[in-house]
Amino acid sequence: MKNDVNMKTPAALGAALILLAGCMVGPDYKRPPAPVAAAFKEAGDWKPAQPNDAVIRGKWWEIFGDAKLNSLEEQVNISNENVHIAEATLRQAEAVVEQYRAGLWPTLGISATATRSRAPNVTGGAGSTNNTPVNVYNLPLTATWAPDLWGSVRRNIEGNLANAQASAANLANARLLAQAQLATNYFQLRVLDEQRALLDKTVAAYQKSLDLTRNRYNGGVAARVDVVQAETQLKSTQAQAINNGVQRAQYEHAIAMLLGKPPADFAIEREKLAVAIPAIPPGLPSQLLERRPDIAGAERKMAAANAQIGVAAAAYFPSLTLSASDGYRNNFWPDWLTAPSRFWSLGPALAETLFDGGLRSAVKQQAVAGYDINVATYRQTVLTAFQQVEDNLSALRILEEQNRAQDDAVKAARESTELTINQYKGGTVSYLNVVTVQATQLSNESTAVSILGQRLVAAVTLVQALGGGWNGLPEKAAQR
């Protein structure tokens, strides 16, 4: 009967450890609700076009149909240093997960030592000690294991896995930010090219006006002041065209930085801007929670903070450590690795903190507060995302209306300039009238180009606000 008890006791202890190892204290994570509207206010009566070419895909910049932009965007993932930083941070976070996973397994070690020692020669009432030198040869194999009885290790794994997933979302967000900055800088550079082309065209027109005025002055029909006004107008416009190069160079340098290249080794040739404004479908607000990498990252940070509450709660419970050793020890080299020299030990250690001055309570309160901070951050990120989408939807709608009105203003200004020049040739108006209408025409044409640039930037920013071509965490990151 005694033997039966001895056989059953280890089995019962093993079963108890298995059951305890499945226990995890602390709250299980559930995503808190976020403020989500039923629809975007600025979306209006949007309906998907057929065919739906403006649907945001992985390479979202292709909806603009600009070959040069496409080639530049392909280089961002390869060369952008901020993307490299985010990618390395992700690998670092994944390594931390594996680091904590190692805590689920026992630690094995082996060492070999050989020592020679001699005790001091002590003389006392009981006689003297033997101080003959002694050799000790030791070869132990040790094993220690701390079963994760209360889930502290598993909660750490859970939290750091969520952090790794947040890092994956941050990597996607870094890519999206670099892509959007590149597209924005590129379109602003192309708008400056359009402005330069407009100024060059205007300079040519003003040169013709100056030639006309000089001919009239030489013929005694016009006054000298007309020639001076024409020259002033021409020179000031030429100065504007030269100044255009300053901003263009800065945008070119910014693009080089985004591509990880020295500005001195990078240049973009002037080209005509031939881009249509795509009709970008906003989708539903609820889809934004899955499509924006920064929202996904904030949500994963909540999960990580929730896991830390469980880690703090596990500190209230006792810890169990199982240790074992096996090996050989002897004072004589020839007999070191023989059966009589073998030794072994096996035993558990149970420890519990009885008093810590409120340390564990404070750590848990800190973890709960950290979770609350991440919940508020998540909800604020969601609200910010909705605001950005609404802002850019309204910007595109209003700028489209402004563009139509500005086109009409440009047509009227061109007609007014043509009529006034004819009147000047007929001698019915002064050259000051010509200068005025030409300046008005240039201003309106320049405004029209600026509105086009604003519409392109708003379209890029809307794509970024909608999450770009990101479709959620990859399956590998979700299952690590």
Image (spheres, rainbow, N blue to C red):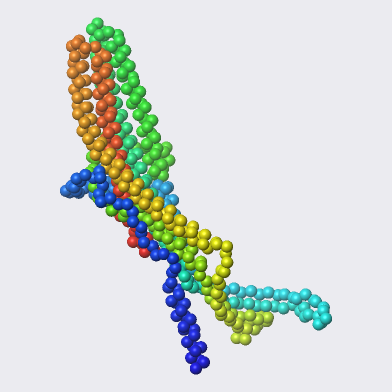
| Total count of labels | 0
Instruction: Please tell me whether residue 96 is drawn above or below residue 85 in the rendered image.
Output: below
Image-quadrant location for residue 194: top left
Residue 104's x, y, as percent? Answer: 47, 70
Q: Which of 412/321 is in front? A: 321
Which residue is depicted at the point 51% across and 62% down?
361
Q: The C terminus is located in which quarter?
A: bottom left
Residue 275's x, y, as percent? Answer: 25, 39
Which residue is depicted at the point 24% across and 39% down?
397
Instruction: Please tell me whether residue 462 is drawn above or below residue 293 in the rendered image.
Output: above
Q: Is residue 7 visible?
A: yes
Q: Which of 259/147 is in front? A: 147
Q: Is residue 332 left or right of residue 186?
A: right
Residue 70's x, y, as percent? Answer: 30, 45
Instruction: Please tell me whether residue 467 is drawn above or below residue 162 in the rendered image.
Output: above
Q: Which of 406/430 is in front? A: 406
**Which residue is most to the top?**
220
Q: Is residue 275 visible?
A: no
Which residue is depicted at the point 43% across and 62% down?
307
Which residue is depicted at the point 77% across and 80% down?
130
